[in-house]
Amino acid sequence: MSLTKQQSANTLTKKLLLPLSNLGELLRHMHWKRFFRRLFKNTLMSLWMYPIAMFFAVIFGYPLVWMVYSSFKPTRELVKNVWALPTGVSFDNYRELIHNDTFLNYYQNNLIVVLVSVPLLTIIAAMAAFVFARIKFKGSNLLFYMFLAGTMIPVHVTLIPLYTMLRDLHWLNTLTALIVPFISFNLPVSIFILRDFFTKIPSELEDAARVDGCSSARIFWSIMLPLARPAIATVVILSAVSAWNEYLFALTFIGANNDAYTLPLGTLSMVSALGITHFDRMFSVLTMATLPILAFYFLAQREIIKGITAGAVKG
């Protein structure tokens, strides 16, 4: 009986010591030079990358912060010390802007341009991208590359022909003159982003839907479009930012009608009218025009990264 207990104790001891022996064997076979080299390399990269990232964050972020807190300072404080923080917070400039019908009209026009052009652009680009990615016909690749070649056409070259065409259509000095060219010039990039995503969707899903009797339109609306939400979000965000900041088309095609001014044109007009005597109002106008789209972009930047990188790794 005692012998059996001794054997059981030896077996238990071996089982307890086995992980330690395996750990020792693992440590003996580790490539210590490679381990310390990687550790040193990662530490060294962190030591110089973080300060550089912080430096550029300050360089690009401080002007925005300075513009915001300067909008709460009266002009006499700005003239006295440009860099100092405001001694007191005053919302008088923003109250004046909110009750300014002209500025609210600029905001309204900008919202109309964004809310009309972005959905139309997204729907047209998604349908075209689906056709190029999933429906093969003679000349489809050639037609796609012709669309893609549109990204290489400088906008400035087309201003005079566009102006003539919009004048003949009696669209000049209306928001339509801004919406239609914006959609046309942003279609190639949007189609490219969405087509690349559609090509990564497994064809088995489409084949199964066709077996069940789904048409191409049903496959697009019920299967492909929901799966392409990351890419659609990317197109929506990028086009919304671009439409909000559109200046060249606005200046060329609606510059003669003050009632049709969008926010970029209206901001320039108000800043020019204020001159150099009302810095506080000037900064409040710039802040109201800039912060909404910046906040929208920062809140949605994760969706942009997800949409651009979706499908980049196979499997």
Image (tube, rainbow, N blue to C red):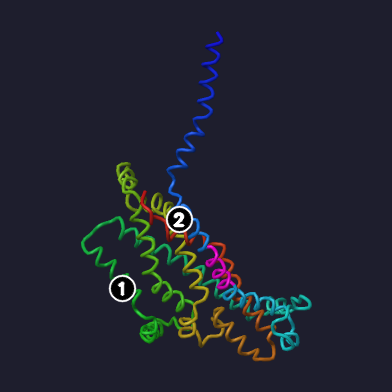
Residue 208 lies, with reference to residue 305, above or below; the image says above
Give the alpha-carbon distance from disc 1 to disc 2, as whole Å. 26 Å
Residue 55 horizontal/vertical position (percent): 57, 73
Neighbor class of circle 1 (other Cα within 10 Å; few <14, some 14-19, many 20+) is few
Q: Is residue 138 above or below residue 76?
A: above
Decide: few, some or many residues near mark 2? Use Cα within 10 Å; few <14, some 14-19, many ≥20.
some
Instruction: Identify which amino acid the numbered label 2 is placed on.
Output: Arg
Main secondary structure found in the magenta portion: helix
Circle 1 sits on which residue?
149
Residue 238 is covered by the magenta coloring? no
Q: Residue furthest right?
A: 88
Residue at which label 2 appears: 229
Residue at 39% across, 49% down = 223
Locate the N terminus by quadrant.
Answer: top right
Q: Secondary structure at mark 1?
A: helix
Q: Quadrant of residue 212?
A: top left
- Residue 153 x/y as whole percent: 34, 79
Of 270 and 80, nearer the camera is 80
The magenta region covers 46-57
Looking at the image, residue 95 sits to the left or right of residue 194; the answer is right
Relative image position of residue 96 (x, y in whole percent): 71, 79
Q: Secondary structure at mark 2?
A: helix
Asked whether, in this view, residue 166 is left or right of residue 240, the answer is left
First in sequence: mark 1 or mark 2? 1
Residue 151, quarter of picture:
bottom left
Q: Residue at x 49, y 30 (%)?
A: 18
Q: Is residue 314 left or right of residue 22?
A: left
